[in-house]
Image (cartoon, rainbow, N blue to C red):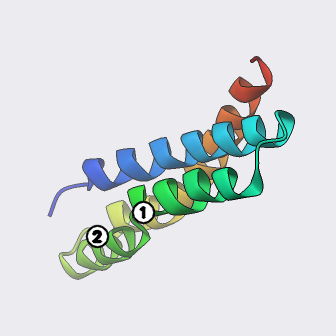
Amino acid sequence: MTFPYGTCIVNLSGALLMGFFATLFQAKFAPPSLSLLITVGFLGAYTTFSTYALDTSYLFKTAHPYLAWCYWLGSPLAGLLCLSLGSFLATLF
């Protein structure tokens, strides 16, 4: 198995969008139902935590421990950075 670029890109872009919309909705006083629909509903379905877990497991099982550790630890850290970047971008609007 090679590095799961697709899952990584989807999860990081979802984190960026989550930060953006959560911050934007909070600043614009959007109805809570709209905020939950977009952030938890749409973006929660868009991101793929279970696939991230499965891909990490496959990397460990297929003798790619370095890639597995990088993906396992790097995805949440990069996700927090993307969430923060999205939040920052929303403050520019």
Q: Position of residue 2 (x, y in %)?
A: 18, 57
Q: Where is the N terminus found, in terms of image quarters?
A: bottom left
- In the picture provided, is 31 more to the left or to the right than 12? right
- In the picture provided, is 54 more to the left or to the right than 23? left
Residue at figure coordinates x 44%, y 59% from the top left: 70
Residue at figure coordinates x 46%, y 41% from the top left: 13
- In the picture provided, is 25 more to the left or to the right than 46? right
Q: Position of residue 11 (x, y in %)?
A: 44, 53
Local secondary structure at mark 1: helix
Q: Position of residue 18 (x, y in %)?
A: 61, 47
Local secondary structure at mark 2: helix
First-in-chain label (2 vs 1): 1
* Location of residue 64 (image quadrant): bottom left
Q: Residues within 10 Å of mark 1 (few under 14, many from 20)?
A: few
User: Is 46 situated above or below 16?
Assistant: below
Residue type, mark 1 in image: Ala
Nearer to me, 36 or 65: 36
Q: Which residue is mark 1?
A: 45
Residue at figure coordinates x 60%, y 41% from the top left: 82
Q: Which residue is mark 2?
A: 55
Q: Position of residue 61 (x, y in %)?
A: 23, 82
Q: Residues within 10 Å of mark 2 (few under 14, many from 20)?
A: many
